[in-house]
Amino acid sequence: MLQVGINGFGTIGKRVADAVRAQPDMEVVGVAKTRPNYEAEVAVRKGYPLYAAVPDRIERFEDEGVELAGTVDELVAASDVVVDACPSGIGAENESLYEGYDTPALFQGGEDADVADVSFTARANYDEAVGADAVRVVSCNTTGLCRLLTPLSEEYGVEKARVTLVRRGGDPSQSSRGPINDILPDPVTVPSHHGPDIQTVMDVDIDTVGLKVPATLMHVHSVNVSLGADPDAAEVRDLLEGEDRIFVVPESFDIDGAGKLKDFALDAGRPRGDLWENCVWGESITVDDGDLYLFQAIHQESDVVPENVDALRAVADQADYEESTATTDDALGMGL
Ligand code: NAD
């Protein structure tokens, strides 16, 4: 059993912990928190051993009657691999901690690419992460685009991709984020950082632009890809329907936006209403003279979760791509 420690138990960390626990070949050694808030309470209720991320703050946990299993150093020492799910930039600060214990580490997409040897999306470059000491699981948007562009590139070739990302202002729990009533070109300069970030994973010609809107549910991408072939829309749809981590939303579901997608996920019994798959609207798939157009929605809080699980197996050299993704998807209950 692969022993996995999780440093940072917020939006991503708590989901990765639950996903690791669901796997037949890995265990959560424990999770590290900076303070005894509601997420620490949930960790305790779920039986995850809780470690103090900042040793100076042990007293705060004791004052609140929250029992600790130790400090983050002990967690790192006890782990075969650590998942760093701290806020952007903190992961890089933690690098020396993991190196000090010779514990391989996964970082998240908020870190710069140079934090790790490999920037990772399972569908695009699983093999590059096998046996690596440090892997960066790229951001939600980059993950979603790599998952989409890899099969298109393999099947038809991608001459040029142009993507407009309509980004949620913040996650549902981020009460300090915005905009509240505005539509922001973000960044106002072109291209946005997403295209270059995708190029840290795969070799593709892509330009991206971004906007931020007052929404918390999901991101929505308007995608245009100039293909190296001229398939019809039905062929592209078949290709995408064959991808395990792409959900082609059927017309008959009458899902007109992110709100109904999230409602569907909750009704379907998904934990936290999570949508691990890219959600591509089937009727949006259009091809005109080799130019593909489609809309996809990306659930920012959860699409990177299966990728973290696969990156753990890759780093531990515990399974190949096919075996890892099949195990991950089966254990999570992927497929809608
Ligand atoms: P978050 O703020 O929800 O969670 C981070 C957690 O780490 C919090 O519980 C915080 O208290 C804790 N923390 C802060 N400093 C710490 C430290 N020194 N040691 C240990 N824990 C510490 O953040 P998040 O949304 O989970 O983001 C984590 C990473 O995942 C970032 O790199 C982010 O860019 C990336 N990411 C986020 C999303 C998203 O939409 N939320 C999507 C994909 C990737």
Image (cartoon, rainbow, N blue to C red):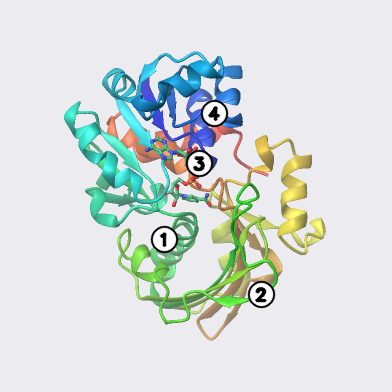
Residue type, label 4? Asp
Please tell me whether mark 2 sits on a helix, a strand or a loop: loop
Q: In screen coordinates, is 302 left or right of 268?
A: left
Query: Which mark is on residue 18?
Result: 4
Toward the viewer: 192 or 69?
69
- The number of numbered badges drawn on the structure is 4
Q: Does the beta carbon at disc 2 come under 8 Å from ligand 1?
A: no
Q: Position of residue 256 (x, y in %)?
A: 77, 64
Toward the viewer: 235 or 195?
195
Query: Which mark is on residue 150?
Result: 1
Q: Are marks 4 and 2 in contact (CB under 8 Å)?
A: no
Residue type, label 1? Thr
The part of the image, by quadrant, that contains residue 96 is: top left
Q: In screen coordinates, is 285 left or right of 106?
A: right
Q: Disc 2 designates what residue? A: 182
Q: Is residue 236 depicted above or below 304 in this figure?
A: below
Q: CA distance from mark 1 to mark 3?
A: 24 Å
Q: Earlier in the sequence, mark 3 or mark 2?
A: 3
User: Badge 2: how crowded within 10 Å, few (<14), some, or many (20+)?
Assistant: few
Q: Is residue 307 depicted above or below 103 in this figure?
A: below
Q: Disc 3 designates what residue? A: 12
Q: CA distance from mark 2 to mark 1?
A: 34 Å
Quadrant including the C terminus? top right
